[in-house]
């Protein structure tokens, strides 16, 4: 295990051996966060996957060619050039299949992905047997490896990452239009084919420079995970791009650092796991679209609905007991309240518990229930709002009285104070002067005493 | 309102017929002196247009001249090639033969004169943009490459939203808009282009009554300003109340001309074939149930 000192040293880029790797992987993360966002919005994620797998034959062939010319065959620029060319060949094959046959996109992509990868694995095996060549290390292009890096390699990766980021920022308006509505873009005269090629070009660039550190199997995750995570936090493109770049950058930085400290772990896997953790956090906790906040909001609404149902049921019970006289806050047995609505016993128990917690409900020494002082006031208010809304629906929205209770139930929970005042203003003054107007329709379980 | 126009085809037919006799324009327009502000060419002239998908023809020998300042409805059964006609005019799909000219020019030289409203379902509404962002796309052509949406264009986008009555929803994410509101956003985006010819693909599909009314209002205002609107439409009951010029389409142009003259039982029969009988039966049954 590494000491704390080592960890800090790597993370803060003080270690010469890992500094270049960590910086270049972080830049790669930023670039793939930006480019990946557009790839995701263009709904071409699978195409990126096919592309990355299609780079492998190029790596093997480039190695063989360089060995034939008398080198060690491991010059990074040469390998990356080979990867680029065979990646492009993969995309072209895909386009040819799609446009000349009636096969669907996913079939074409699956075909290219597996065939090119198969060819790549086979040729990798073959070049390993070349006389005088040591192909050891080429497999790192499959799973990724953060070995130390020479400065010229670093410069290539860093500059390609920087240029890709820059281009996607400069073309943000054009890419946005292409991704959202390509037919409209074409009708406006934008060269959609050229823009698509530009986008795929950026994806190719990021994929190829990601081969060494992340590996071709997992580089697609590096493209897709940051923007997907970012999408949970925002509904707007600009913040999404910024967040996606940050998440990509942080994943690259942390992932490369961790894998530098524990060389037995493949770098690509570590980087992707870091990105996936950030994704998981976003999915669970992001306030805009995260699961947790959504459950909280739903639970909150449910409690609110439950509370209003409980209070109104109690008030209508008291109304019934008062008959023609003024409604007074008297006690009642639990069962009478329970039978007023179709609550399950479990739910009813919880509703009572919450009502006690909120100080709306008291128990008399005789074991009967009674609304507390604030509870009684709140019950009167809730019932009044409900009836105002019902009256409004009957008078203005032409809803049959027999249907109104159900609709009112659904809508009253979102009635704001302002709307209530507006209703009061628009409805008959005499009805409003009463603290709680009579229900505009017969209440279930209550004999038609008040018309 | 819906009740009064719903499915009383013979009635509206008669009233519209009278109206159209009064307002009937001589066409093609020879009277250049009446409209000196515009070139003598007509907004949309289509000649000998044929479009085929995978060897299966969708449009055959289309011959059309759309007069200026008219509200034109394109009506026909499903699969009649209505959307395809618009897309072919916009160079979005290749023409097998023929041409479509906008004010006498091919589309690529007349883009600034044309605004397109695609079908609402053609895009993913769960996209991370606001209503205002989408409307601002109408200015992208004006802005050109690389330039960001300026403050002025944002103000114009807000004005366009105002015109379709949803300026208060400018900052709303588009997935949180109702179907009708989404359709209005698309219309506002087209308004941004300040075009002469508007091609709209089913703007009335699955919208609420208020939106339908707002769209009709907007179309009328556009045509009062001398703009020409081509609208793909589905609802036969409202055809004659909404449009003053009609194109009945079913792979070929069955009939085109002033709405009142064209919207006859015979023409509809030709357009819809057996399908209309079914519609008629339904309309008949409905009328009985109302009476």
Image: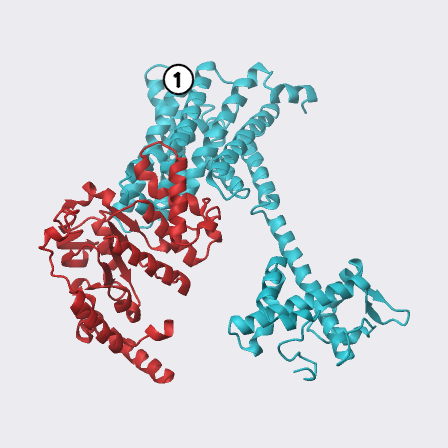
Chain colours: A cyan, B red
List x then y, in percent, for residue A222.
Answer: 49, 35
The residue shown at (61%, 22%) is A11
Quadrant assignment for the C terminus of chain B: bottom left
Indicate the quadrant where residue A439 lies.
bottom right
- B107 up-or-down from A312: above or below: above
Q: Is residue B208 visible?
A: no
List x then y, in percent, for residue A344.
Answer: 71, 70
Q: Residues within 10 Å of mark 1 (few under 14, many from 20)?
A: few
Q: Secondary structure at mark 1?
A: loop
Protein chain holding label 1: A
- A151 up-or-down from A55: above or below: above
The residue shown at (37%, 15%) is A71
The residue shown at (43%, 28%) is A165
List x then y, in percent, for residue B232.
Answer: 27, 60
Q: Is residue A207 visible?
A: yes
The residue shown at (73%, 76%) is A339
- B165 up-or-down from A285: above or below: below
Query: How many labels sit on residues?
Result: 1
Q: Residue furthest right?
A: A365
Q: Nearer the viewer, residue A149 or B5?
A: B5
Q: Is residue A225 left or right of residue B220?
A: right
Indicate the quadrant where residue A19 lies.
top right
List x then y, in percent, for residue A229.
Answer: 53, 40
Quadrant assignment for the N terminus of chain B: bottom left
Q: Nearer the viewer, residue A444 or B88?
A: A444
Q: Is residue A88 left or right of residue A330?
A: left
Q: Is residue A391 left or right of residue A54?
A: right
Q: Which residue is mark 1?
A: A132
Q: Is residue A212 left or right of residue A202?
A: right
């Amino acid at each position: 295990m590494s000491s704390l000192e080592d960890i800090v040293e790597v993370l803060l880029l003080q270690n010469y051996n890992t500094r270049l790797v960590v910086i270049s992987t972080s830049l790669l993360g930023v670039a793939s966060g930006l480019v990946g966002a557009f790839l995701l919005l263009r709904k071409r994620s699978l195409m990126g996957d096919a592309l990355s797998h299609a780079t492998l034959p190029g790596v093997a062939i480039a190695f063989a060619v360089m060995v034939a010319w008398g080198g060690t065959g491991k010059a990074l620029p040469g390998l990356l050039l080979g990867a680029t060319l065979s990646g492009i060949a993969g995309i072209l094959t895909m386009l040819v299949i799609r446009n000349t046959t009636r096969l669907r996109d996913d079939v074409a992509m699956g075909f290219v992905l597996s065939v090119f990868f198969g060819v790549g694995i086979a040729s990798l095996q073959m070049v390993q047997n070349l006389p005088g060549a040591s192909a050891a290390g080429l497999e790192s292009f499959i799973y990724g490896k953060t070995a130390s890096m020479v400065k010229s390699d670093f410069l290539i990766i860093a500059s390609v990452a920087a240029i890709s980021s820059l281009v996607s920022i400069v073309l943000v308006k054009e890419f946005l239009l292409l991704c959202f509505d390509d037919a409209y873009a074409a009708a406006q005269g934008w060269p959609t084919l050229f823009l698509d090629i530009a986008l795929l070009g950026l994806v190719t660039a990021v994929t190829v420079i990601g081969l060494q550190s992340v590996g071709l199997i997992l580089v697609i995750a590096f493209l897709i995970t940051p923007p997907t995570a970012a999408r949970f936090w925002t509904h707007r493109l600009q913040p999404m791009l910024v967040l996606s770049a940050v998440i990509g950058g942080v994943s690259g930085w942390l992932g490369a650092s961790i894998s530098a400290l524990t060389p037995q772990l493949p770098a690509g896997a570590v980087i992707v796991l870091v990105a996936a953790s950030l994704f998981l956090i976003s999915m669970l906790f992001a306030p805009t679209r995260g699961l947790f906040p959504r459950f909280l909001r739903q639970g909150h609404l449910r409690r609110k609905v439950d509370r209003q149902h409980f209070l109104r049921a109690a008030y209508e019970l008291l109304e019934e007991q008062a008959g023609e006289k003024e409604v007074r806050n008297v006690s009642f047995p639990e069962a009478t309240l329970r039978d007023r609505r179709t609550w399950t016993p479990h739910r009813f128990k919880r509703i009572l518990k919450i009502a006690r917690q909120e100080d709306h409900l008291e128990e008399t020494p005789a074991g009967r229930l009674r609304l507390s002082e604030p509870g009684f006031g709140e019950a009167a208010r809730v019932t009044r709002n409900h009836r105002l809304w019902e009256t409004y629906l009957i008078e203005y929205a032409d809803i049959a009285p027999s249907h109104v209770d159900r609709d009112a139930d659904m809508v009253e929970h979102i009635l704001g104070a302002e709307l209530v005042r507006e209703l009061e203003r628009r409805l008959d003054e005499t009805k409003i002067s009463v603290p709680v107007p009579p229900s505009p329709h017969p209440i279930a379980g209550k004999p038609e005493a008040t018309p | 309102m819906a009740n009064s126009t719903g499915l009383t085809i013979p009635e509206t037919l008669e009233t519209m017929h009278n109206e159209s006799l009064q307002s009937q324009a001589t066409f093609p327009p020879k009277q250049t002196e009446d409209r000196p502000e515009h070139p003598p060419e007509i907004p949309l002239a289509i000649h000998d247009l044929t479009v085929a998908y995978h060897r299966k023809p969708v449009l055959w020998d289309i011959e059309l001249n759309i007069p200026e300042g008219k509200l034109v409805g394109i009506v026909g059964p499903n699969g009649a090639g209505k959307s395809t006609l618009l897309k072919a005019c916009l160079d979005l799909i290749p023409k097998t033969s023929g041409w479509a000219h906008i004010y006498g020019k091919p589309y690529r030289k007349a883009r600034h004169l044309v605004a397109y409203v695609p079908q609402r379902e053609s895009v993913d509404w769960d996209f991370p943009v606001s209503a205002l962002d989408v409307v601002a796309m109408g200015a992208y052509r004006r802005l050109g490459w690389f330039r960001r949406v300026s403050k002025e264009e944002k103000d114009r986008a807000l004005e366009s939203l105002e015109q379709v009555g949803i300026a208060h929803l400018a900052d709303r994410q588009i997935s949180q808009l109702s179907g009708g509101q989404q359709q209005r956003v698309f219309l506002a985006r087209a308004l941004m282009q300040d075009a002469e010819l508007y091609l709209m693909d089913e703007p009335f599909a699955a919208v609420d009554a208020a939106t339908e009314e707002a769209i009709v209002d907007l179309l009328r205002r556009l045509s009062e300003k001398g703009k020409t609107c081509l609208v793909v439409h589905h609802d036969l009951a409202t055809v004659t109340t909404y449009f003053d010029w009609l194109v009945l389409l079913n792979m070929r142009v069955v009939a085109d001309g002033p709405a009142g003259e064209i919207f006859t039982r015979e023409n509809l029969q030709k357009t819809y074939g057996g399908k209309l009988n079914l519609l008629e039966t339904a309309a008949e049954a409905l009328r009985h149930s109302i009476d």
